[in-house]
Image (cartoon, grey):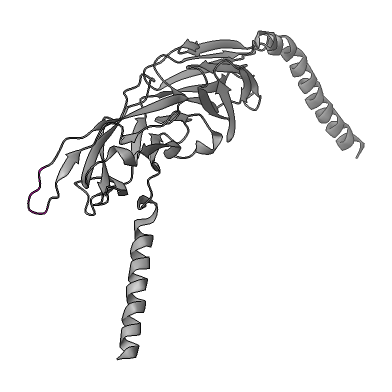
């Protein structure tokens, strides 16, 4: 019997410890303000940098929900109970080369603070967390309103909080706001070399540039797997392309601008034609083709002028052979 009681006590202690671990960082008993994290994700094309902008969030008291079968009563959150401390409520996104190749990237986090003193009665208190609509071109801002619920016990202490998703099986939400950054386009620069003297193995040099919002960057792929980055307000870049190769400036929105200029190869005998705009802005994927043509024509009349002499030499050779054969036959 004594052994059985001991086992029950040990089991109870283990169960209590497990529950405390399961509650993790969302459970607490003291009266100090607590924090919870909001995460900002961006979905984009693999060769695009994340946008250079700041995302802002706001917290407002939620709508009460009456108790019903299977539903707890939820109260309107008191003003200031959940709030953004100074400097919080904003997530700044900056282009980073480590994001290249990723189609979903986490650009940053911010925290919600909780003021325990604002809650004067036990219950579940609801807030709405939303993202403010921004104006950064190419970004589809999230219009989602997430429920953020705060749990207060009979001692009027906040003991748990969580983002809530009523459509989820476990009723929880991860606090991630996702924005699409896909309303952007690419400029493809192609190189062609034509003509009977066009050098298809030659590297032709181009100066390329792109510009957009402050801090915005543009990834460029070109040639045989080479890359370079263009940045707003920074110097242009020089690349080289051979016949059949191309370069692509990725991630241009409708008001971003680009420019591409090929070195002048007139002195080498090339004439250059361009199909497409060498500079400007775009609202769809665009291709600009540079064709360098070099042709050389042999002077006319050369074969006619030397033909009689060639014929004379040939006739003389034939006569010499015949003469020598006859002479040999006579002597024999």
Q: Camera-side residue: 71 or 146?
A: 71
Is residue 254 toward the left or the right of residue 294 in the image? left
Task: Examine the image and state in which quarter residue 119 appears.
Answer: top left
Q: Looking at the picture, how far across and down is residue 38, in whole percent?
A: 38, 39
Q: Position of residue 192 (x, y in %)?
A: 54, 21
Q: Which of the 4 image quarters holds residue 239?
A: top right
Q: Residue at x 77, y 22 (%)?
A: 314
Quadrant housing the C terminus: top right
Question: In the rendered image, is residue 198 in sight?
Answer: no
Q: Main secondary structure of the magenta part?
A: loop
Is residue 90 rendered magenta in the image? no
As drawn, 140 above or below 301 = below
**Percent x, y of residue 53:** 45, 24
Task: Evaluate whether residue 149 shows in this view.
Answer: yes
Stretch in magenta: 66-70
Q: In the image, 72: left or right of 21?
A: left
Residue drawn where x is 84% and y is 34% of the image: 325
Q: Residue at x 60, y 26 (%)?
A: 242
In the image, residue 243 sits, relative to residue 31, either above or below, namely above
Quick one: which residue is furthest to the bottom in this view? 1
At which x and y percent is residue 95? Answer: 51, 29
């Amino acid at each position: 019997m004594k052994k059985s009681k001991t086992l029950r006590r040990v089991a109870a202690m283990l169960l209590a410890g497990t529950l405390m671990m399961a509650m993790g960082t969302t459970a607490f008993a003291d009266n100090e303000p607590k924090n919870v994290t909001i995460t900002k994700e961006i979905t984009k094309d693999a060769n695009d940098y994340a946008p250079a902008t700041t995302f802002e969030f706001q917290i407002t008291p939620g709508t009460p929900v009456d108790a019903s079968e299977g539903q707890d009563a939820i109260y309107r959150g008191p003003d200031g109970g959940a709030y953004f401390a100074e400097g919080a409520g904003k997530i700044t996104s900056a282009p980073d080369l480590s994001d290249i190749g990723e189609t979903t990237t986490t650009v940053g986090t911010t925290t919600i603070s909780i003021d325990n003193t604002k809650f004067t009665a036990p219950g579940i208190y609801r807030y709405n967390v939303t993202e403010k609509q921004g104006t950064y071109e190419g970004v589809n801002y999230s219009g989602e309103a997430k429920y953020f619920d705060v749990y207060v016990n009979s001692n009027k202490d906040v003991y748990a909080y969580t983002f809530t998703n009523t459509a989820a099986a476990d009723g929880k939400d991860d606090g991630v706001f996702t924005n699409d950054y896909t309303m952007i386009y690419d400029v493809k620069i192609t190189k062609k070399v034509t003509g009977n003297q066009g050098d298809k193995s030659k590297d032709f040099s181009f100066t390329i540039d792109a510009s957009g919002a402050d801090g915005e960057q543009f990834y460029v792929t070109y040639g045989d797997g080479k890359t370079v980055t263009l940045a707003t307000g920074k110097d242009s870049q020089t690349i080289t392309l051979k016949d059949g190769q191309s370069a692509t400036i990725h991630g241009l929105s409708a008001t971003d601008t680009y420019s591409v200029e090929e070195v002048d190869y007139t002195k080498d005998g090339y004439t250059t034609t361009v199909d497409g705009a060498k500079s400007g802005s775009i609202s769809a994927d665009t291709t600009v083709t540079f064709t360098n043509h070099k042709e050389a024509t042999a002077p006319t009349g050369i074969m006619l002028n030397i033909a009689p002499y060639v014929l004379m030499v040939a006739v003389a050779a034939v006569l010499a052979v015949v003469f020598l054969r006859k002479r040999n036959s006579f002597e024999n």
